Image: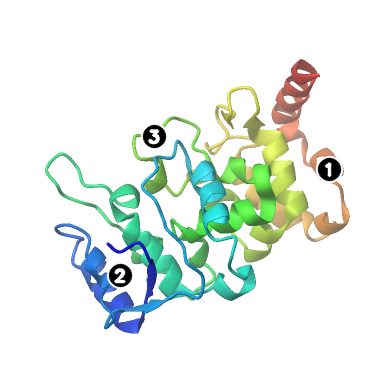
C-alpha cells in the first residue's frame, strides 16, 4: 500500500461491502485503497500505521491525532473515509480465527450506515467520535470490563446499553455521569457488574434516562446533580464512586 492514503469511492465501497457480505473470505481487499477506479485522494495527507491498541479508547485517541488536520464536521459522515480506514484495519476489527475464518456479522460495523440507529456502531468512526466529543469520559463506552484478545473487534455492551438514543451519545453531562458512576479509575476498567442487567446496571441507566427526560433536562445539570437524582437502585454505584474518589484524594 502506498504511503499516501486514499478513501474509497462509491465503486470501492460497493466492492468492500460485497466482500463483507460474502463472509469476508480471504485477505481484505486492500488493493481497493490504491486503485484509482475504487478510491479517491484525500485533501489532507494521513499515514495510518500498524500500531497495537490495548482498547478502543486508545484507538480513538490515536484516530483523533491522525485526523486532526480535517474539519470534523466535514468528515463525520464521510463513508468513503471511514470505510477505507475500516478496510485498512480489517484484520484488527474482524480478525480471522485459527482456521483463517472470519465472522464479520453486521456490515454496519465496517461500512458506515446512514441510519442513526446504526452509524455509531461503525468500529472505526465510533471511537473517533466518542473521544472527540467526550475525551476521557468516553472510556466507559469504549473499554471492555475484561481484557479482550482482539479489543478493536468488540463494539461493547455498555455502549449498546447506554446509547439507545442519538441525543444520549452527544450529551456531555450524561456520558460524564456514566463514566464517573461506572468507571474504576484505579483498575482503568468499568466496575464489575456494570455490563449486566441487574439493579443500577448500564442497561438500567439507559432505561431510567427515558423516564428522567420527562421531568429533568440533563443538559442543564452538572454530572454530580444528575447522579444525585438517579433512583435508589443506583446507590451501590454511588457508594463505589465515592469510595474511589476518597482513595484518589
The image quadrant that residue 240 belongs to is top right
125 left or right, relative to 229: left
Q: What residue sits right under mark 3 in the picture?
A: 148
User: Which residue is found at the position 30% from the left and 64% from the top?
Assistant: 2
Q: Nearer the viewer, mark 3 or mark 1?
A: 3
Q: Position of residue 185 (x, y in %)?
A: 65, 27
Disc 2: CA contacts within 10 A as few (<14), some (14-19) or many (>=20): many
Residue 99 drawn above or below residue 105 = above
> In the depicted view, which residue is nearer to us: 99 or 7?
7
> In the depicted view, which residue is nearer to us: 74 or 65?
65
Disc assigned to residue 165: none
Instruction: Work out which quarter of the rendered image holds the C terminus and state it.
Output: top right
Helix, strand or loop at label 1? It is loop
Q: Earlier in the sequence, mark 3 or mark 1?
A: 3
Instruction: Work out which quarter of the rendered image holds the N terminus and state it.
Output: bottom left
Helix, strand or loop at label 2? It is helix
Q: Earlier in the sequence, mark 1 or mark 2?
A: 2
User: Which residue is found at the position 28% from the left and 50% from the top?
Assistant: 91
Distance (Cα) linking label 2 and label 3:
29 Å
User: Which residue is found at the position 55% from the left and 72% from the top?
Assistant: 75
Helix, strand or loop at label 3? It is loop
Q: Earlier in the sequence, mark 2 or mark 3?
A: 2
Residue 243 drawn above or below residue 172 = above
Q: Would residue 106 be visible to someone looking at this image?
A: no
Q: Position of residue 234 (x, y in %)?
A: 72, 34
Disc 1: CA contacts within 10 A as few (<14), some (14-19) or many (>=20): few
Disc 3: CA contacts within 10 A as few (<14), some (14-19) or many (>=20): few
Distance (Cα) linking label 3 and label 1:
34 Å
Q: What residue sits right under mark 2 in the picture?
A: 33
117 left or right, relative to 108: right
Disc assigned to residue 229: 1
Amino acid at each position: 500500500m502506498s504511503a499516501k492514503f486514499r478513501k474509497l469511492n462509491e465503486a470501492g465501497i460497493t466492492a468492500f461491502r460485497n466482500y463483507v457480505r460474502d463472509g469476508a473470505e480471504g485477505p481484505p481487499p486492500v488493493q481497493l485503497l490504491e486503485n484509482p477506479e475504487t478510491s479517491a485522494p484525500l485533501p489532507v495527507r494521513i499515514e495510518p500505521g500498524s500500531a497495537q491498541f490495548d482498547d478502543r479508547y486508545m484507538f480513538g485517541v490515536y484516530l483523533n491525532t491522525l485526523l486532526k488536520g480535517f474539519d470534523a464536521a466535514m468528515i463525520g459522515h464521510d463513508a468513503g473515509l471511514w470505510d477505507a480506514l475500516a478496510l485498512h484495519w480489517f484484520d484488527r476489527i474482524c480478525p480471522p480465527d485459527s482456521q483463517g475464518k472470519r465472522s464479520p456479522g453486521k456490515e454496519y460495523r465496517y461500512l458506515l450506515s446512514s441510519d442513526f440507529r446504526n452509524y455509531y456502531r461503525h468500529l472505526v468512526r465510533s471511537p473517533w467520535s466518542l473521544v472527540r466529543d467526550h475525551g476521557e469520559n468516553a472510556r466507559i463506552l469504549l473499554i471492555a470490563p475484561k481484557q479482550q484478545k482482539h479489543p478493536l473487534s468488540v463494539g461493547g455492551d455498555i455502549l449498546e446499553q447506554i446509547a439507545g438514543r442519538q441525543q444520549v451519545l452527544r450529551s456531555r453531562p450524561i456520558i460524564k455521569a456514566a463514566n464517573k458512576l461506572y468507571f474504576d479509575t484505579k483498575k482503568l476498567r468499568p466496575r464489575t457488574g456494570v455490563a449486566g442487567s441487574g439493579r443500577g446496571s448500564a442497561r438500567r441507566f439507559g432505561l431510567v434516562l427515558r423516564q428522567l427526560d420527562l421531568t429533568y433536562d440533563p443538559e442543564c445539570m452538572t454530572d454530580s446533580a444528575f447522579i444525585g437524582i438517579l433512583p435508589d437502585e443506583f446507590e451501590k454505584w454511588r457508594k463505589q464512586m465515592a469510595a474511589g474518589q476518597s482513595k484518589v484524594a
